[in-house]
Image (cartoon, rainbow, N blue to C red):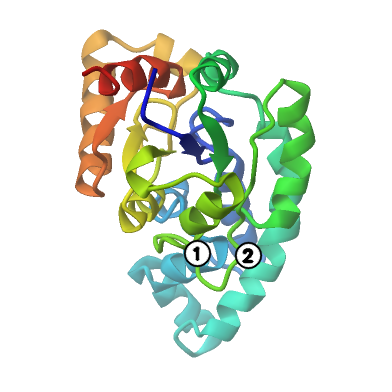
Amino acid sequence: MTHFKAAVFDWAGTMVDFGSFAPMGVFVKAFEQFGITATIEHARGPMGAPKWDHIRTMMDMPEIASQWEAKYGNAPSDADVDKVYEIFVPMNEKVAADYADLVPGGKAAIDELRAMGLKIGSTTGYTRSIMENVLPVAAAQGYEPDNLVCSDDLPEGRPGPLGMYKCMVDLVAYPPAAIIKVDDTEPGIKEGVAAGCVTVGVAMSGNAVGKTPEELAALSEEEIAALRANATKILKDAGADHVIDSVADLPDLVRELSKG
């Protein structure tokens, strides 16, 4: 038995899209439409935030802001963010379903958690229009969480707590200490912290490592350990109570936390 009532999962980099690849190239291509060179490294930095906020953060990066000002004669404004966002969302809608494979062991982990009596919730930095393309692909693999809170569902997104509060209402699960928030990004972990939930970071499947299972398999133990240590530090610094490699490890952690 466990005292936990629900586990709330992020999507890309946590439950699907091992390595969190779907948005990366789209951010780069969206900026290309405006004659601006952005890199995958630029795109990975704010990952987990609502996509409008993500673009705002990228446009505030000195390397991008200076290009924008040189080309358009002004520092990037919120109206400029709107323009990039309007290009980004339809592009991301098209590719998100191509990166919606469940992480290895994810389905089995969800089945175990449900058998323990936990409800399964979800929040995401994706908009609902993007998620409409992801949900059927996940469902075909047997993953259908009990709710979904998207970045544009509420007046404020991550790292604020409103998405988690909505999960508590949808799932009828409380208090916050009885809910586990699982995420691979800083904003997603901070979302759980802000709501007072137990937070679990996933290191190896997520944005901070940014590699496929096949790419990881080709690395040495030392290289993998270094990647794990870096991702763990990022997640712990964001407030993660615990860090595991992937959601496949969550049932064992829940059993451990439920002892005594």
SS for tag 2?
loop
Q: Amino acid at mark 2?
A: Asp
Residue drawn where x is 33% and y is 35% of the image: 200
Residue drawn where x is 40% and y is 21% of the image: 250
Residue drawn where x is 32% and y is 40% of the image: 199
Task: Tell which of 233 and 73 is nearer to you.
Answer: 233
Q: Position of residue 156 (x, y in %)?
A: 50, 70
Residue 21 in the figure: left or right of residue 61: right
Identify residue for label 1.
157
Answer few, some or many: residues within 10 Å of disc 2's Cα (few below 14, many 20 plus, some between 14 and 19).
Answer: some
- Quadrant in which the C terminus appears: top left
Asked whether residue 125 is in view, the answer is: no
Task: Tell which of 99 and 150 is nearer to you.
Answer: 150
Residue 142 in the figure: left or right of residue 20: right
Identify residue for label 2.
152
Callout 1–callout 2 Cβ contact below 8 Å? yes
Asked whether residue 40 is in view, the answer is: yes
Q: Amino acid at mark 1?
A: Gly
- Quadrant in which the N terminus appears: top left
Residue 250 in the figure: left or right of residue 227: right
Q: Position of residue 188 (x, y in %)?
A: 41, 49
Task: Tell which of 82 and 106 is nearer to you.
Answer: 106
Seen in the picture, residue 237 relative to 213 is either above or below; the reply is below
